[in-house]
Amino acid sequence: MEKQGKIRIIIGPENKIIWAKKGENLAIVLRNNGININTWCNFKGICGKCLIEIISGRGGKEKKKEIELKKRNNWPDNYRLACQINLKGDLRIRIPDESKIKRINVLNSGLIIKTEINPGIKKYKLWIEEKELEKESSLIDIVEKKLKIVKAKTELEALKKLSQFNFKKKSLCVYIYNDQDIIKIDEDKSKLPIYGLAIDVGTTTLVGEAIDLESGEIMAREAGFNNQIKYGADILSRIAYASLGRKNVKELQKIIINDLNEIIKKLSDKIKIKRENFLEAVLAGNTTMNHLLLGLTVNSLGQAPFISLFSYLKPIRAKDINLKINPGGRIFLAPNIHSFIGGDISAGLLAADIFRAEGPLAFIDLGTNGEIVIKKDNQIVAASAAAGPAFEGGNLSCGLPAIDGAISRAEFRNGQMKIGTINNKPARGICGSGLIDLIAEFVRQGIIKPDGRVASQKKEILITKNIVLTQEDIRQAQLACAAIKTGLKLLLEFLGLYPKDLKAIYLAGAFGQELSIENSQLLGLLPSIETKKIIFLGNSSLAGARLLLLNKKSRALLFSLIKKIDYISLAKNENFQRYFLQALRFEPWS
Amino acid sequence: MEKEKIFAQMNQAIIDGNEEEAVRLARQALELKLDPSEVIEKGYVPGIQKVGELWEKGEYFLPELITSSEAMKAALAILEPELKSREKSLGVKGKIVIGTVEGDIHDIGKNIVASMLQASGFEVYDLGADVKLEKFIDKAEEVGADIIGLSALLTTTMIGQKKFIDLLIQRQLRDRYLVIVGGAPVNSDWATKIGADGYAENAVAAVYLVQELLAKTKRR
């Protein structure tokens, strides 16, 4: 079998054949063909997690970084980093299991908060009498009258269904959205619950829940990848790709919608309910995801003055974006606050109940972009700090996200470094919380100096077999911690607050519960306030989406409150550089 | 002997990033009627070179780089006016216009590069952040620059570096300037792809790059 001008890649031992073009990146080709190869360092060639074995064919010249990495790990000559290979000719390869992403750990699905149950979708049971048919001119008029709705908007799909059955002899079930729109009419199945979906639309992963809208019960939870990752791990790479043309925007939209539909299908299979029975989905994603899933261009999000197309949007029809729930079902997007502070954060603020709680409060989402929101009385300010991917295991020679085998805890005891890994699997890398623990312990021991320098002549520290913390890794951690510290400090200053004034700091994001507060305080990532005031929220974006789904009053509350939030540009602050350079030191807040 | 001792102290002041001491020693050198050009070359330059080495070894990071280059700049500000005019023209190693490209408001990295270049004896014109591409050319023409340095800190704004080179070609000025690029999302592949003359990963590498590029052109 020959394909003109194409390169053939045979993947053993199954001998799966895939085709590629000359010059294409092997890791991207593999991903495009459904092989989820690790690219934790974002194609920088430093983490070594996309290692493959070349059985035959040429992988091309190796760069210095790859040669050094291979030497350090004693990898054989024919082992290569897939992300560093630009295809020149046919290849036969083997992909070790360790190089594939196996499953996603949904570490924590957010606080379960009690709420009044008042969903956007309501179900009414109707019985139509003979005499009513004589009095009114149309069936919808009868429905309107019975439900006391003026000029209902009726979905065509609902009418089609109505036309199919004999309404004289049966009672009907009418599903109304926002007390106004008739989105579904069915034979009376009043015993059937109504379902909705709450989905956290992350840059890397998606987590969705199927929820019974009458009881509020979470019926099922599923997670999946955001396959846009092949166009870059971080949000700016996606914007850059989308900015190259309409076609790319459409492609990114298609990918995210497919991924969402995949989750919806898994949820419907799990609870054995047809997808048509999901009548509303609340999506909480960052501003870029919100734009892309609607198929909107994002050029303005990637360039100063960084302006988004919308903050909040009236619910849209599921079929308008091809989301496979009931075609007349509604999609509600958690509102964006700013181009860098999206619906994931507004949902998170709702979950933390930050708007109603008393006293000065801070909310921090620790990720590649560290979003920080502080409330003082009626004033709310927000900023986005460019922490870089270190907290998520990116850009580190030893980095891993919080997956099986990632070192997530470390403690120096009896002259030895004791490490703990996720699911107690053999250690194969370090994730954010582990990085903080290790560095804090080494700082205590004097092995790492407060200025970030490794004290020994050899500028790296062996953690365990094959896992080394390099000087450069520590520098990345310094930059990440300093970005958050500087952002928090500037916002506090803006409001005239000291850290001790804060009644609570809510932490959301990649770290999960594993982050040591004490160690974070030692390094200056978090201010030295009473540890009980620092509260982990888990996946607050999902928790917020759930609240928005179950109680439509919370939507109005959120709309009115995000309007009050002032966005502060950190980079433009005159003290930014000075504070940032000071914050690079590993030391507690003074 | 006395002279050697002062030079060693100057050296140390730069390595320590001690601006006050660096300035004090520069003033003392003038009082002692030492030759300012010798003072710069033997007292201060080895200090900033050592700082570069310490950076490369991983001993120094950004705060140390900034304090040392600030100390160096402060000392140079005192000594340079005293150089004889002939020496002045010889003393300037090259002129560089630098800035962060339009659409990008981040400039710490660029500031550190500008500071190190200045500390290493180059004449640096820093245009700040979010700089219109035409403005780089206007400034370079005005001051007769040798090199134009463009920083971009976002994946979405690095395209500005390519646009700038295209603009230079369009205005038939490509041969007049050396163009160097840098910033977090930028790498040497990108620099090659867009036809830039060089890329540096950090401020210390930028100094070496500029020295190397200027040495090459002078040989030509």
Image (cartoon, grey):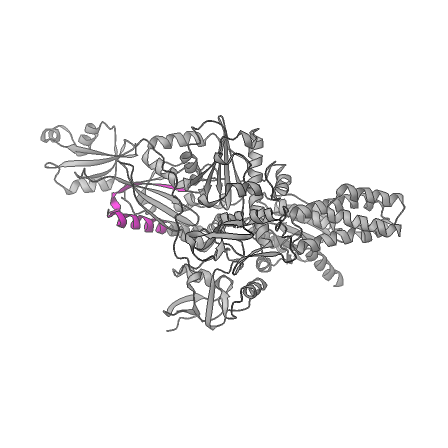
Q: Is residue A263 magenta?
A: yes
Instruction: Give percent across and percent down for residue A338.
Output: 48, 38
- Left or right, B17 with respect to A332, comes to right
**Residue drawn at (37%, 39%) of the image:** A545
Q: Is residue A194 above or below residue A77?
A: above
The range drawn in magenta is A257-284
Residue B22, picture quadrant = top right
In this orientation, does residue B142 appear?
no
Q: Is residue B41 above or below residue A377?
A: below
Q: Quadrant of residue B63?
A: top right
Q: Position of residue B120 (x, y in %)?
A: 74, 51
Magenta span includes A61: no
Q: Position of residue A153 (x, y in %)?
A: 26, 34
Q: Main secondary structure of the magenta part?
A: helix
Give x and y (percent) for residue B194.
Answer: 58, 57
Q: Nearer the viewer, residue A57 or B127?
A: A57
Residue A58 appears left or right of A117? right
